[in-house]
Image (cartoon, rainbow, N blue to C red):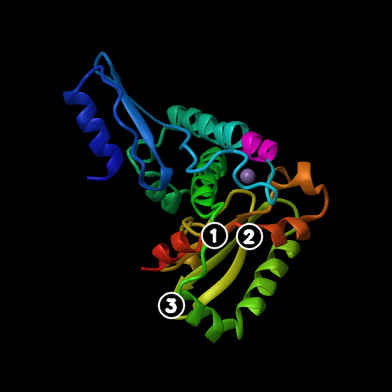
Amino acid sequence: MDKRTFLKTTAIVSAGFLLKPDEILGFNSASDVVGNQVITEFTLPKLAYSYDALEPHIDKMTMEIHHSKHHQAYITKLNEALASSTNESYKKSSLETLLANISEKDVAIRNHGGGHYNHSLFWTLLTPTTKPINEKLLTLINAKFGSFDNFKDAFTKEALSRFGSGWVWLNFDNKNGLSIVSTPNQDNPLMTSIYKEFSNTTHLLCLDVWEHAYYLKYQNKRADYVKAFWNLVNWEEVGKRMS
Ligand code: MN
């Protein structure tokens, strides 16, 4: 039984009560019952820090618009797309399962579901109180890239060469070790039905390189935004994703 199914089942026995959100990484859903009809929808996860906490690297207004407007819009449109979808299995899936099985043809769910997942994850990977990277990950980075600075250069290069909007990822798999890739739009490494190469891959770190993530402060200077990002990486959280 996945979490959304559990929430639905629980919703039936506790009819009329709004249930606590599933807060695993913020990929939450809330369920309620109207008559005999169970309504399940995704809701905006709270941030672990205030909108101005990432200043001066990411400014308050960017964070506020990014979270409360852009991220919320992905969630609203994802809920609408799921409500009008004829694919019943999509409606019963957790967000992760939904994205793993998404078809290229389901453009709205792919874009808005990806948008909800990517932003929910991204917020957890930022922190105003960054700590040193953990030893295990640093060892892997040194083995693959030669040094931590080389790794940052490679990640930055990928961020700058991603044309248009997209995301940069640090992935890990047992065969190849660490790798840096980018995806267009709101696609992500969970979408293994579309991107076979991401099967058996864990994504450890991500960076939003859409202009809405940096334009107010950095305008066209994406490189400056990426440079600032290194001051905010939540290495503790990245480390947890490895284990
Ligand atoms: Mn964004």
Q: Quick one: 206 or 103, which is closer to the camera?
A: 206
The residue that disc 1 covers is 130
- Residue 199: x %, y % from top left: 44, 66
Q: Quick one: 32 or 222, which is closer to the camera?
A: 222
The residue that disc 3 covers is 136
1 or 2: tag closer to the N-terminus: 1
Q: CA distance from mark 1 to mark 3?
A: 17 Å
The image quadrant of residue 18 is: top left
Three-letter code for the amino acid on which mark 1 is drawn: Thr
Mark 3 secondary-structure assignment: helix
Q: Is residue 200 left or right of residue 49?
A: left
Tell me the residue at 29%/28% (across/down).
Answer: 19
The residue that disc 2 covers is 231
190 in the magenta segment: no
**How many residues crowd around disc 3 within 10 Å: few (fewer than 14), some, or many (20 or more)?**
few
Q: Does the residue at mark 1 contact the one at mark 2 (Cβ under 8 Å)? A: yes
Q: CA distance from mark 1 to mark 2?
A: 7 Å
**Which region is colored magenta?**
60-66
